[in-house]
Image (spheres, rainbow, N blue to C red):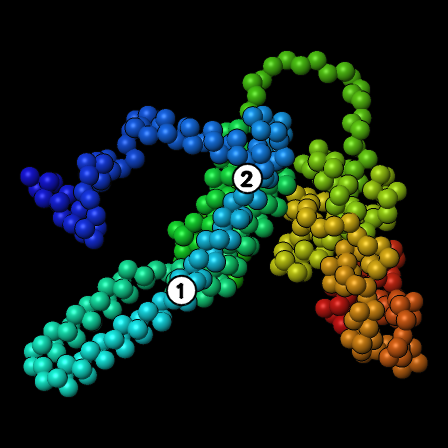
């Protein structure tokens, strides 16, 4: 009897919504203990329709799905991006309209009270009308109030876009080989734009910072609420005897051991794309050299300084994080940049920042070596070489191969 009364009270609290048996069952049993459920057939049909729709977006002929699951997942992520952009635009519009509606209710209440007073209405009647308008205003506030509509819209958008970028960087390092894995990735990606995820991150970030400061936030970033880390693990295989020749052949990508960790050696295409993005020559992309190792160290030092990774080791071997950093970067324009930092900081060439660079370099150069305001690129690079030769700078990365190049460390110390 008590349970029935509680269920009725709960149903009444849903602003007059219909109280069905399913509501009571959900309150009592939650998700349930049975794998099957009443809408299983409908959900399966809907998922089949969705898969067919995304296949068409993947440039596959109607009625077939000739693309692999990796491309299918990318097309699905693009579709989710479009839906997420629409939701964020709607959310911004809703937040902007709350104020005018509240003001309209207040203005209408004031006007009504003035008219009633002018027509000789009793104080009791005026009080009842004022109370009604106050109830309307409070009801509107209660119905519209939510964290997403209270915080600045740019904060919400920054959270969603940064999470999407992080997720896509992780996706570049995994391989989706079947439908269940593709659906899992898309569901995870979809959750990034859901209200409870955004609100959870805002609340968690504030709480984490209050309890542990910047260090706690850095630690929390390594274990995000939503990711696809399990797809990066190798599946367990039963132990069995395998014949191995005494001298196994050298794998074809062993040449990349010079610039990549063993954990990333299987990603040959990613390694080659990464080398192109950090300004390695076409010959170095095919066959890395010691010069290529130095270019990798420039990338690693950029991440160490700009991404706040104090423990990052500059060993010249790209790990998964290094590959993810350049996963979506275009090939380096070697006519305007000589390493990853220059490509990132000066995409139009170092002359685009000539004035500031000349001032920084002249602050370290002897008077006789100072550069004129209109110094050309060769002169600026000669000035860089002279500054790098100063031992008082204490540069961690000061290889002769980059004696005339700018790095994040050098610019910061200037």
- Looking at marks 2 and 1 on the same chain, the residue that comes earlier in the sequence is marked by 2
Q: Position of residue 106 (x, y in %)?
A: 26, 75
The residue that mark 1 highlights is: 95
Query: The C terminus appears in which quarter of the rendering?
Result: bottom right
Q: Is residue 332 left or right of residue 305?
A: right
Q: Does residue 85 sit above or below 107 in this rendering?
A: above
> Which residue occupies the foreground of this view, 99 or 355?
99
Q: Residue at x 22, y 40 (%)?
A: 23
The residue that mark 2 highlights is: 76
Q: Is residue 270 left or right of residue 6?
A: right
Q: Residue at x 76, y 61 (%)?
A: 347
Q: Position of residue 409 (x, y in %)?
A: 74, 63
Q: Residue at x 86, y 57 (%)?
A: 335
Q: Residue at x 33, y 25 (%)?
A: 36
Is residue 221 at all visible to an observer of this figure? no
Quarter of the image holding residue 348? Answer: bottom right
| Few, some or many residues within 10 Å of mark 2 (<14, 14–19, 20+) | many
């Amino acid at each position: 009897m008590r349970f029935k009364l509680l269920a009725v009270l709960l149903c009444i609290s849903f602003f007059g919504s219909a109280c069905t048996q399913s509501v009571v069952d959900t309150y009592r049993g939650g998700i349930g203990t049975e794998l099957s459920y009443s809408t299983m057939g409908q959900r399966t049909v809907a998922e089949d329709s969705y898969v067919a729709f995304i296949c068409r977006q993947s440039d596959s002929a109607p009625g077939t799905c000739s693309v692999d699951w990796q491309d299918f997942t990318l097309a699905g992520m693009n579709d989710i991006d479009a839906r997420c952009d629409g939701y964020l635009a709607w959310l911004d519009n809703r937040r902007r309209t709350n104020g005018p509606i509240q003001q309209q209710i207040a203005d209408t209440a004031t006007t009504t009270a003035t008219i009633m007073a002018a027509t000789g209405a009793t104080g009791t009647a005026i009080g009842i009308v004022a109370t009604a308008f106050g109830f309307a205003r409070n009801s509107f506030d209660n119905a519209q109030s939510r964290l997403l509509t209270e915080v600045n819209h740019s904060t919400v958008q920054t959270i969603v876009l940064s999470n999407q970028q992080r997720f896509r960087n992780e996706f570049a390092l995994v391989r989706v080989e079947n439908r269940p894995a593709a659906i899992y990735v898309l569901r995870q990606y979809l959750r990034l734009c859901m209200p409870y995820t955004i609100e959870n991150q805002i609340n968690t970030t504030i709480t984490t910072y209050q309890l542990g400061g910047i260090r706690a936030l850095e630690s929390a970033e390594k274990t995000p609420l939503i990711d696809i880390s399990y797809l990066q693990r190798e599946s367990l295989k039963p132990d069995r005897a395998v014949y191995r020749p005494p001298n196994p052949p050298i794998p074809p990508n062993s040449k990349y051991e010079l610039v990549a960790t063993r954990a990333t050696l299987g990603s040959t295409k990613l390694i080659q794309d990464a080398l192109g993005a950090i300004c390695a020559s076409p010959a170095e992309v095919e066959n890395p050299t010691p010069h290529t190792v130095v270019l990798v160290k420039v990338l690693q030092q950029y991440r160490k300084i700009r991404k706040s990774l104090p423990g990052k080791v500059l060993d010249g071997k790209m790990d998964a994080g290094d590959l993810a950093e350049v996963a979506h970067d275009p090939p380096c324009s070697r006519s305007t940049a000589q390493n990853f930092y220059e490509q990132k900081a000066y995409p139009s060439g170092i002359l685009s920042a000539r004035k500031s660079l000349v001032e920084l370099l002249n602050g370290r150069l002897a008077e006789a070596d100072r550069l004129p305001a209109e110094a050309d690129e060769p002169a600026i690079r000669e000035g860089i070489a002279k500054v790098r030769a100063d031992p008082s700078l204490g540069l961690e990365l000061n290889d002769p191969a980059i004696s005339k190049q700018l790095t994040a460390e050098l610019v910061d110390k200037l």
